Image (cartoon, rainbow, N blue to C red):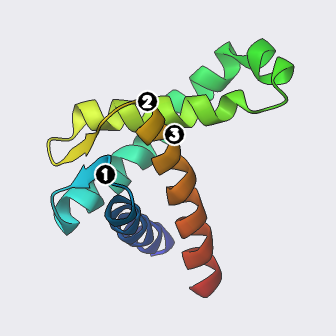
Amino acid sequence: MGLIVKILLTGVAALAAAYLLPGVQIDGFVSALILAIVLALLNAIVRPILVLLTIPVTVLTLGLFLLVINAVIILLADSLIAGFDVDGFLWALIFSLVLSIIEGILDLIF
């Protein structure tokens, strides 16, 4: 039950972030739910591999390179989902930050 609630909250957060950012478009709530599922899968499978491969750069930048990894995962999700569009790397980075902030607020509320 907790996973379903988390995916629903991520979908709502993605819709809110796309509403706030002009460089990100989501077609509807169904696309946002698909985005939440794809992001969960990418974060579970691809992110640990990328983090492991980029440990030296992450240590050198004091962890800031993890923001780049988050943006790359957003761009991967953009290429996989038809109803989700990000205009570039900078918008993916900003979307990642805004999505994390909104998800944190929603986690505190619920």
Relative image position of residue 43 (x, y in whole percent) = 51, 40
Q: Is residue 53 left or right of residue 69?
A: right
Q: Residue at 60% across / 75% down in the picture?
A: 105
Say which amino acid is labelled 3. Leu
Task: Measure the alpha-carbon separation of dots 2 and 1.
Answer: 17 Å
Q: Residue at 81% across / 24% down in the picture?
A: 61
Relative image position of residue 110 (x, y in whole percent) = 56, 85
Task: Measure the alpha-carbon separation of dots 2 and 3.
Answer: 6 Å
Task: Measure the alpha-carbon separation of dots 3 and 1.
Answer: 16 Å
Question: Which of 80/61 is in front?
Answer: 61
Whether 77 is drawn above or below 57: the answer is below
Say which amino acid is labelled 2. Phe
Whether 91 is drawn above or below 36: the answer is above
Q: Is residue 105 left or right of residue 4?
A: right
Relative image position of residue 11 (x, y in whole percent) = 35, 65
Q: Residue at 29% across / 37% down in the picture?
A: 78
Q: Which residue is mark 1?
A: 35
Q: Which residue is mark 3?
A: 93
Q: Secondary structure at mark 3?
A: helix
Could you say which disc has been placed on residue 89 in the image?
2
Q: Residues within 10 Å of mark 2 (few under 14, many from 20)?
A: some
